[in-house]
Amino acid sequence: MENNEKVQQDFCKGTLDSIQSLISRMDLKAGIILTVIGALSAGLYALLGVLIKCGLASLHCNLLLMGIIILYFLDIIYILWQTMRVFLARSATVGNYSQAPLMLYPLLILRTFKSDKDYAERAKQLSHNDIIADYANQTMECSNIYKLKHEHVNKAIKALGFLLLLWLIFVVIATWKIFF
């Protein structure tokens, strides 16, 4: 293999590795969002228990708190929907129009080859252009997966901001009601 071909293959491999790392970060962010929701909800539940023990306040205050709780749980449902979509397994997101040998992605390997022998025979015949085409195909696939995950994480983060606002309002009203 010529030095230039090695540089090209290393570049393509590095690009694919970088994108896969970014995809992992989106999964991590979605996990952090779920953890934050759990912590906020546990705090809200504990404060709600204290609030109930202290007795009910005016009808207006109770209706306001109930409205906040309803919005809170509706927002949680939306955030859960967005974060669960981040964890969804995806395959062939940009279509099967590629001329690449499809030898990098497990599901495409299983669809393309009947056995490890078939895979090995094809691998022995790979040209430099085949390898670059396969890297290009998987770079496009992974880029599209990253884009989808990125969109869902951003929607979940925005909704989490609203959830934090609702949580803060509830805490302020509940604390005021408990102590005053």
Image: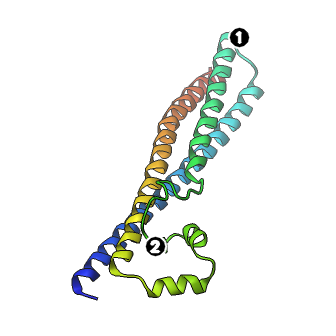
Q: CA distance from mark 2 to mark 1?
A: 68 Å
Q: Secondary structure at mark 2?
A: loop
Q: Position of residue 48 (x, y in %)?
A: 70, 31
Whether residue 21 is visible, yes or no, is no
Q: Is residue 24 left or right of residue 54?
A: left
Amino acid beneath label 2:
Pro
The image shows residue 43 at horizontal and vertical percentages of 64, 40
The answer to the question of whether label 2 and label 1 lie on touching residues, with beta carbons closer than 8 A, is: no
Which is nearer the eye, 180 or 109?
109
- Per the image, label 1 sits on a secondary structure element best described as helix
Res 59 label: 1
Q: Is residue 22 left or right of residue 2?
A: right
Name the residue furthest left.
4
Where does the image place residue 109, in percent across and percent down from the top left?
56, 72
Locate the N terminus and report the quarter of the image it occupies: bottom left
Going by the numbered disc 1, the residue's amino acid type is Leu
The image quadrant of residue 91 is bottom right
Q: Residue at x 49, y 82 (%)?
A: 122
When the figure is inspected, residue 104 is found, relative to residue 45, above or below; the finding is below
Q: Quadrant of residue 178?
A: top right
Residue located 58% across and 54% down the image: 87
Q: Observer-nearest residue: 115 or 26?
A: 115
The x and y percentages for residue 103 are: 49, 74
Q: Which residue is mark 2?
A: 101
Tell us which disc is closer to us: 2 or 1. 2
Q: Residues within 10 Å of mark 2 (few under 14, many from 20)?
A: some
**Which mark sits nearer the N-terminus, 2 or 1?**
1
Can you say whether 9 is above or below 64 in the image? below
Residues 16 and 49: in front is: 16
